[in-house]
Amino acid sequence: MDDFRIGGRTCRLFGSDAPACILVQPSARHENATLAAEAGRLAELSAVPFVLATVELADWTLDLMPWRDGNISRDPEAGIHAQETLAYVLTALMPELRDRFGPLPAILGGYSLGGLFALWASTQTDTFRAVAAASPSVWIRDWVPFARKHVPLAEDVYLSLGDREEHVRNQAIARVGENIRTQYGLLQEQLGPEHCTLAWEPGNHFTDNEGRLSRAFAWCIRKL
């Protein structure tokens, strides 16, 4: 693992010193303990050398929500900082990574709100060849109307969801199952069936997060 600071943010590198692709993942402090395990599991799944670059966010929710939804956060700052996070990735992190490793194909991925951010970001930039969205929070208000109108600029998109995630009492969160199925159907139309997949994982939203992400990234690497 290699830690470094860019633009006031802590970034970490895991993986090969001579990678064939770059993986970018926004991360929360609570994920720090599992990042090395995620990279290790990914290395077992992928024969292709990679470097995983994680960006530690100051506030997981505020930095990743593409717009406001009171069911996720009632903070008045919610929904206005995702653009800043994406701008940081594109103008600070990616130039640094390409200076170090060259113009390699890049994949953007994340878990939960990180997965939602990756899906949203793929409609704003063509920087990333693939998107690894593990258990993305597509239950956010108005996600489906947004997805209908905005086609990802990535070539390949991986979706996953735990098979217990839609079976919850909270009705806002419960719509995640219907929304992920709709999202997958849209991707099949927008990108083609060979360029997307939807994996159903055992368990709820808090089951094997790093395993789900490693499988998501591994699928995307195979598609490069």
Image (cartoon, helix red, strand yellow):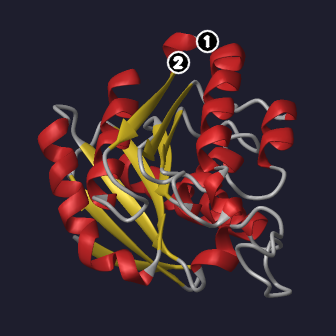
Q: Nearer the viewer, residue 138 or 17?
A: 138
Which residue occupies 12% across, 42% down? 44
Q: Quadrant of the N terminus?
A: bottom left
Q: Which residue is mark 1?
A: 192
**Residue 188 percent coordinates (x, y):** 63, 17
Q: Nearer the viewer, residue 122 or 208?
A: 208
Which labelled disc corresponds to residue 195? Answer: 2
**Residue 77 percent coordinates (x, y):** 82, 84
- The residue carrying pointer 1 sits among few (fewer than 14), some (14 to 19) or many (20 or more) residues within 10 Å by Cα, namely few
Which residue occupies 65% across, 22% down? 185
Q: Residue furthest left?
A: 44
120 horizontally vs 78: left or right? left
34 horizontally vs 59: left or right? left
Residue flagged by tag 2: what amino acid is it? Answer: His
Mark 2, secondary structure of its residue: helix
Residues at marks 2 and 1 touching, judged by CB atoms closer than 8 Å: yes
**Residue 194 percent coordinates (x, y):** 50, 12
Which labelled disc corresponds to residue 33? Answer: none
Q: Residue furthest front?
A: 169
67 horizontally vs 44: left or right? right
**In which image quadrant can residue 87 be found?**
bottom right
Which residue occupies 41% across, 49% down? 23
Residue flagged by tag 1: what amino acid is it? Answer: Gly
- Whole-Å distance between the Cαs marked 2 and 1? 6 Å
Q: Quadrant of the C terminus?
A: top left
Q: Is residue 15 above or below residue 163?
A: below
**Residue 31 percent coordinates (x, y):** 36, 75
- The residue carrying pointer 2 sits among few (fewer than 14), some (14 to 19) or many (20 or more) residues within 10 Å by Cα, namely some
